[in-house]
Image: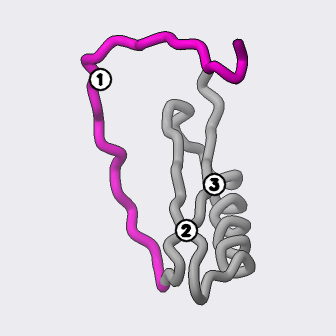
Amino acid sequence: MHIPSVAFSALVGENFSFAKCAAFAKELTRVLLERERRPDVILNVNFPVDFQGIKVTRLGKRIYGEGVIERLDRLDA
């Protein structure tokens, strides 16, 4: 689809602050909107409970060899 995307998630715990995460997410989103980037790149931002900075990593590539097992949930039956 080539839609530039970013996802944010947080681990909630003692000393957790939504305000700190929101401030970082706001600034990162502003920077991302100002710059061009490859449309096939998806950013995934994970906030630990008490973060002090950033660490950029690559998402691991996985090949799932097992097939899909289709089932009906008994609650939907």
Dot placed on the residue nearer the N-terminal end, 3 or 2: 2
User: Element at badge 1?
Assistant: loop
**Which mark, residue 64?**
1
Q: Nearer the viewer, residue 11 or 60?
A: 11
Question: Of helix, strand and loop, which mostly describes the magenta segment?
Answer: loop
Quarter of the figure with the C terminus: top right
> Picture coordinates of residue 8 (x, y %)?
62, 56
Quadrant of residue 60 in the image? top left
Q: Which residue is pictured at 64% across the width and 19% down the height?
A: 74
> Picture coordinates of residue 54 (x, y %)?
45, 73
Going by the numbered disc 3, the residue's amino acid type is: Leu
Pointer 2 local density, CA inside 10 Å: few below 14, some 14–19, many at least 20? few
Contact, mark 2 vs mark 1 (Cβ under 8 Å):
no
* Relative side of 44 to 29, left or right: left
**Which mark, residue 11?**
2
Going by the numbered disc 2, the residue's amino acid type is: Leu
Quarter of the figure with the N terminus: top right
Q: Is residue 53 above or below residue 67?
A: below
The residue identified by callout 3 is 32
| Magenta segment | 52-77
Q: Is residue 59 above or below residue 27?
A: above
User: Element at badge 2?
Assistant: loop
Q: Nearer the viewer, residue 34 or 6?
A: 6
